[in-house]
Image (cartoon, helix red, strand yellow):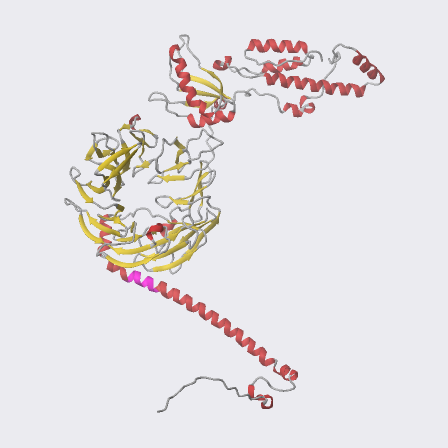
Amino acid sequence: MGQPMTVERVTTRAQLGQNLTVATQQSSPYLERAQKWFFSIKFISGALQNCDILFPRVLLYRSTLTRVKMAKKKVDDKNSLNGNNTKNESDLSSNDDEPNFSDPEGYVDNITDEELLADILKQKPKETDGVESVIVVDGVPQVGPDRIEKLKSVINKIFVKFGSIVNEYYPVTENGHTKGYIFLEYSSPVNAAEAVKLTNNFKLDKQHTFQVNLFTDFTKYEAIPEEWDPPKPQPYEGQGDVHHYLLEPDAYDQFAVVLGQGQSVQIWQNTQPDPSLLEERHAWTHAYIKWSPLGTYLATFHKQGIALWVGQKFSQYKRYAHANAQFIDFSPCEKYLVTYSPQGDPQHPQQKGIIIWDIRTGQEKRSFNPEGPSSWPIFRWSHDDKYFGRVGNDVLSIYETPSFGLLEKKSIKISGIRDFSWSPTDNIVAYWVAEDKDVPASVTLLEIPNRNEIRKKNLFNVADCKIHWQKSGDYLCVKVDRYSKVRKEKNETKYSGMYCNFEIFHMREKQIPVDSVESKEPIQAFAWEPVGSKFAVIHGESPNINVSFYEVRVGQAPILLKKFEKRACNHLFWSPGGQFIVLAGLGSNGGGSLEFVDTHEFLVMNTTDHFQMSDVEWDPTGRYVTTSVSYWKTKVDTGYWIWSFQGKILKRVNLEKFAQLLWRPRPATLLSEEKQKEIKKNLKKYYPQFESKDRMRQSKASKELIEKRAALMKEFNEYRSKRIKEYNENKQRRLQLRNNIDTDELDADPQNVEEEIVEFFIKEETTILD
């Protein structure tokens, strides 16, 4: 074949043509067709005209095609010719010149390429080869020649995260200014698609937002027909009634139970007298489960991401792909879902650790990377889902929805900020700032979105603060840990003479007055009453642990209502409806103690325990309490117990590898406060109705038990009668086998009776006679 054909990297049209001409002269005439094929391929116009795009595979393909066709022609000629062909081959083999494979004059090739080279034609290059990896970025700043390098540095920093960029092109005007759009070529089409997905609508600054598309999308857009054909309507596929559980006539609540690491998930309905199983699935989750705040969705964890389930049959609603996600958080109104993957995805290292999703559409709204150590949830939501925020390094970042951009395009600079919390009913943020040299610590209330500071309280000698909002948003309590002395050792700060203050903010009163409650004892726990104005505090050290109850009233300082002394508890669990509270001792130090208290008259209704108890959960109505021992905390005596709100044990369930129990939440009531007060006032009118239902339920349970016992007795009597009948029918056979001696009765044959007298010692008495 002479000199081998070389294929070089083609960078310009002139060089490509020159290389192709040389290759044609060095190879056989069949490359003429390859040259025609190649020049039929359209070059990328406009900005891509000078791009360094690889086309050598075109030449390589045509070279392979020609060689195969020449080999095929050689075999055909060999079969068609006789002895002369052998002679010709001998002459050719002895000749040092390159053989001539040209077609004879007048030859007609009637074999199509598809018939001859079907497998090779599958690899035929396309016009789009090489451009699937090209993206077009619009909305780029228009800068002069002196700032192009800086612009390239910024662009590369953004887009290099998705893969290696092999080419870039910045179109410029006659004056050297950029035109506002650029072309980037990745090494892989997968990287290009990922860049389009994650950078489209990316905000570079206030004036520039990127519009990113694949280069191949332009062909699709050009092919849009001039006449629009409306899409055919598709049948509606609903998710069913996602709130069906709220229509239960007797208002029975549901709860979910997880066994092991998601080996089995059970959904129960707390019917009386025994709960009934609604759904059970194996391997439903790989870790644990979580209900949404209003109880609409059930979230399960998987290696690929998070799945949500709804409806009566718990059908899958949406999947959110976030590999190795271990933490999730719902917005209060269930519009958005936040997922967090601490480990990340090794296959997609460019994917960020925190992703915010639109629950209804399943679309990713924005993603973030965690900044330093922080506690979950990293983002905290306002009560209406309009805003969410997080604490950074001396900044408070507030984002707005649905744009998911920074509020007013900038964060709030707050030097020394440590923590913040949203009001549960208003768009008000409470945050605290640590002290710095001569500047005292402070607690500030900030209105959003106008950033108006409505109250600020300076605090001195502060070691730490915890923010506790009352559920109705009427009051705010800031637990302040204070010190008498402080010293610094190396990189650590040590405090001594610790004591505590509770700063109570009256949010509904004019100028928001602040009252203070001081405690010289260490604080174990604090909790507001969900409905009402009382709060409870566990203070002191073992064995002298006390529980104090306070009430906050308008225009007055908090009043001490009751103090329980020497209690074995370390956690407080208020009923969702208020008034009732459980004082619990969790963990190895708590001993599993339980104390059920009615705070209306501070009556201790029951004192009991659940050994090694790890969790306490109230049902949404406040009628039942569950205590549980989780497999995640201990390996023995795992299971859960169900109690009444008065502390009466109703059911004990022991389960091997029991892990988690969660009651299904309920949305807030639709009744107004006036209507609720009216119902409470006239509650005695409803007593007979509920009591009759309870009696019917009890009688129904008793009736079912009586019917069950009667059925068993009837079955036994039928079996007994059947056996007696068989026994009587076989009497003649028994007599034949026993020599006509009737042994059915003991006195039937007195001659065969032997009498034996047996004596044995019973008692010995000794009497002394005078």
Relative to 747, say whether 417 is above or below.
above
**Majority secondary structure of magenta residues:** helix
Q: Residue furthest bottom?
A: 770
Front residue of 222 and 463? 463
Q: Is residue 168 left or right of residue 418?
A: right
User: Residues in magenta?
Assistant: 688-695
Quarter the N terminus occupies: top right
Relative to 726, say whether 1 is above or below.
above
Residue 698 drawn at (x, y percent): 36, 64
Q: Is residue 613 left or right of residue 75?
A: left
Front residue of 33 and 585? 585
Taking the magenta stretch, the answer to whether it contains residue 646 is no
Q: Is residue 66 left or right of residue 582?
A: right
Quarter the C terminus occupies: bottom left
Camera sees residue 148? yes
Q: Quadrant of residue 71?
A: top right
Residue 363 drawn at (x, y percent): 42, 34
Q: Quadrant of residue 763?
A: bottom left
Q: Residue furthest front?
A: 770
